[in-house]
Each structure stands twice: as structure tokens, then as C-alpha cells.
Image (spheres, rainbow, N blue to C red):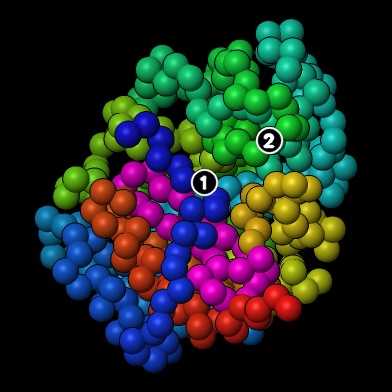
Amino acid sequence: MLIRTIAALAVCVLAATSPAFASDNLDTIVTTAMAGSKVPALGVVVMRDGKITGQAVHGVKRIDQQAPVGGDDVWLIGSTGKVMTVAMVARLVERGVLSWDAPLEAMLPDLAQEMRPEYRKVTLVQLLSHQAGLPRDLQDLGSAEQLFTESQPFPRQRLSYIAKALKDKPDAAPGTAFGYSNTGFLVAAAIAERVTGESYENLMQKEVFQPLGMRNVGFGNTHDGQNRGHQAGKPMLTMRTFDDGAPPMFGPAGFLHMSLGDWARFNLDQLAGSKGQGKLLTPASYRLMQTAQPGRPAGLDWGVQASIAGRQGPVLVHQGSDGNWLAMAVLFPEQGSGVLAVANAGPDMGADKVLTTVLGTLFPGLSPARQAVK
């Protein structure tokens, strides 16, 4: 399976759906979508007018136990967390600690001579908009599986990983194409760690979670007693290989877990930021994140679309999975609305069908129908 961190634009395949029932009856929407599926649990948050207007959870934390999932339980949100990594880096750029346009050889001087020459002029903007030319993951993942049991500090693990990855042949010349890359986000985190002397985990707490009041947040896989991810009909309790999921050091690429409320707090700030009212960043940083790069389908790291499932955009989208969970985030900035949905199972258990059913039902209540181009 490798690392199933899914590209930002996967949500765009949703087809227009006619709601079979009132879209504000969120509990009914969730239970109906799950009926007959193999997904153990589902969580959904609806946002309108700067606040949560609906939240529903249904199912069990583990398919082999009876404990029901609750409103405060945590969910692994996969690559939808990449946008949070961007926000952390943006805070450092705003203070002049980092620069969007500095070359990689200057930001990681100790690796400059060892990395392939093609990567030496890569910038933070290119790393965080998937334009650095880096492959999605380290080409020789088998050599990195010791990371699942590694005891070294995470910054050291990440530095070791990217030192190898920066020797991999580019998928494309940097700056010439969009190529979804988890590695680019690990490189960006290593840059932030080097310049601040702090771990990515500490930086996220200081720069993102604490300012937004996100308290029920963690890094890596969930733990005993918490909501657990599933694969092939079983709870995934231990990660040993990349077929199982991702190693704990993979946080910058989207390996975070949190409550639905905390996930919503970040995305509500993104919606506020689109109107110049965000708490976390400057208006320029929100625009950079939420505006597609020229000729590309994404900003930093939002997928940016003109419409979705027949609904009027612009729309910001992201989807993510480690194979054991599936999360989708869709925001309509002009309407000030959005929906977050997550299942504690991957596509192999039908989570993609369940989530797209929920989103397709909710979209008509979040954005008007797309206007025909005259």
C-alpha cells in the first residue's frame, strides 16, 4: 500500500447529488450514508457564518469492540493537516525567520553539496505547492522502515529521511509541474526546525494550535482507548511497515490526529482569513495559501477549484489518508461555509463512498448551484 496520502484534488470527482432528505438533519445524513457499509465510525462537521452549525458522529471506535465514538474523540486527518504545516511556516515567514523565495541550498546548507543539483534552488513556495519536482515519497522506502521503531528525536529522523530523498531523481524539473509530494513537506519542516532550533511538534503547538485554542491534538497514530483506524476489516494498532501506514515522524506531511472541534477551529480561521478577518496569519499569507499557483491546481496546500459537484465556487479542497483513515475538507470561502468529514477506515473498506455521499448531500446547503457560463 505504501503511504496512502492522497492528493488534494481527489474530492473533485464527486458527482452532483440530489439530497434525499433535509441537509440540516446531519445525524440522519451520517447514519444513512453508513448503512450497509464496512466503515466503523464517521464524524462530520458543518460550518456556516464563522461557527460550527452542525456536528455528528456515529459508530464505534474499534470494529471488534462496542465502545461508541463520541463528539470529543480524536480522528486522524491525514493530508488535510498539510495546510496546518503551511500555516506554521507562514508564521515564521511573517516574522522574517524564513523567506518564501530563499533557495534550498541556503536553507539547508549542511545538505547542499549532497543533494542533487536540481533541488538546490527550490523554494519554500515550491515545496509547499508540490512544484519542487520531488517524488511523492522516498524512492527506497524499504531502507526507511526502521523509522517505525526509531528512538532518535523526530527532527533527526526527518533530517536523515530528507538527506536520502534529496538524492532521488526528480519526477520533473523543479518549478515546471505539479507533482504531489509528502517529501516536500518533510523538507519544509526540517528547514523550520533548523532555523528555530525547535521540533516541528513544538512549533505547531506554539504557532498554530495554541493561538487557535486547539487543545485536543496529537501527532502520529491514535492510541489505546482512543478512536482507531482500520484496514482490511481490522483495527490497525501497530505500525511496522509502510504497508501499515506512516511512521510517527511523518507529522509534517499530514500525520496528525485531533477532535472534530479542533479541526473545525483551524478551518474556520481559514474561512475568516479569506475575508481578511483571520486570527492566525496576515491577509497576504491567507491569499498565498488559498490562491492557485499560476497554471497549477493548488495553492499552499489547498486544492483550488472553480466549482465542485455542481456547486458554485471558488472552493478549497483537500483529502488525505494513511490507508487506515480517510478525511475530506471542503470550504466555500465566498459563502463562508464548509464541511469536514472523516472515517476511521480507508477506501478499502468503502470510506470513500460513504464520505462522498455525505458531502454530496450537504453541498446544496453550503453553496448555490453553479451558474452557467454565458
Q: Is residue 260 magenta?
A: no
Residue that badge 2 annotates: 177
Vertical arrangement, residue 263 with respect to residue 71, above or below: above
Mark 2 vs 1, N-terminal side: 1
Residue type marked 1: Ala
Query: Where, by quadrant of the figure, is residue 169 drawn?
Result: top right
In this view, the residue farthest toward the front is 374
Secondary structure, mark 2, is loop
Vertical arrangement, residue 371 with respect to residue 9, above or below: below
Residue type marked 2: Ala
Q: Nearer the viewer, residue 192 or 125?
A: 125
Q: Percent position (x, y) of residue 296?
A: 70, 47
Q: Percent position (x, y) of residue 156?
A: 56, 22
In this view, the residue farthest toward the bottom is 22
Spatial distance from mark 2 to mark 1, Cα to Cα?
14 Å
Q: Nearer the viewer, residue 70 or 229?
A: 229
Q: Percent position (x, y) of residue 368?
A: 60, 84
Query: Where, by quadrant of the figure, is residue 18 drawn?
Result: bottom left
Q: Nearer the viewer, residue 369 or 245?
A: 369
For the magenta stretch, what is the residue range?
306-330
- Residue at 46% x, 50% y is 320
Residue that badge 1 annotates: 7
